[in-house]
Image: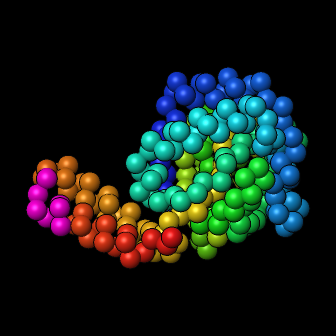
Amino acid sequence: MLLHIPAVLDTTTLARCIDLIKQADWADGRVTAGSQAATVKNNRQLPEISPVAQALRAIVLEALSKNPAFFSAALPRRISPPLFNRYGDTANAFGNHVDNAIRTHPPSAQHVRTDLSFTLFLSHPTDYDGGELIIEDGMGGRAVKLPAGDLILYPSYSVHRVEPVTHGARLACFSWLESMVRDPQQRELLHELDQSIVALRGEHGETDTAVQLTSCYHNLMRMWVTV
Ligand code: NI
């Protein structure tokens, strides 16, 4: 499942992020890539321990924690500390690869199984040419290029790439998460059920049916959440 979550960052927060990023010193993006990915990766990243990256990370994690659509779709148990990248000039693309199954955050030594990946776009689509995130789906790939502040959630097992940026610069935040529900079909079913209950409540208010379906939702969660 690919899920587009709009306006994860509002315009004020986005502007704060861009102000911070202007102070950043970029490094070679291959530092966080696995051996296969490193051969096709050519971009820049903020060093994980840089003060700018840490400030940006706190902003993004707070925004994600307040986003019910993100929670409903991802059911996150652990989010790998978000990273920030820049595609442009001569470091402008990332060829086909699959994300590593496990991310380890060096300061905490915490392991995160990567069930879902996300990209949070920080640049406006008109700021750069190219730079589409292509997620292979067996049909030639889905091209994703979203408004600044919007996020795409996609399965970490998918082959994906970032097309060359031929003009301007593409800034983004990206990371991976381990879900409380490992099975993608179970997770998607819970998400659909949750969204349907929200819609039902919106149309009819609190009803016995809505309560019953909410009970089903939580009982399915009890069956499927791994601890
Ligand atoms: Ni990737």
Can residue 168 be spotted in the picture? no
Residue 114 shows in the view: yes
- Residue at horizontal 66%, vertical 46%? 82
Q: Quadrant of residue 178?
A: bottom right
- Say if 135 sits above or below 131 in the image: below
Residue at 79% from the left image edge and 29% from the top image edge:
24
| Secondary structure character of the magenta stretch overall | helix
Coloring basis for residues: rainbow
Q: What residue is at 55 percent from the left and 56 percent from the top? A: 153
In the image, is residue 134 part of the stretch drawn in magenta?
no
Q: Position of residue 90 (x, y in %)?
A: 88, 42
Q: Which residue appears at 47% of the width and 48% of the height?
A: 5
Vertical side of 28 occupied by 26: above or below: above
Q: Which residues are magenta?
A: 206-212
Find residue 193 and report its image quarter.
Answer: bottom left
**Quarter-wise, where is residue 173 in the image?**
top right
**How far across and how far down the image is residue 191, in percent?**
38, 63
For this rendering, which residue is in front, 95 or 113?
113
Residue 186 placement (x, y as % from top left): 43, 74
Q: Is residue 154 above or below residue 138?
A: above
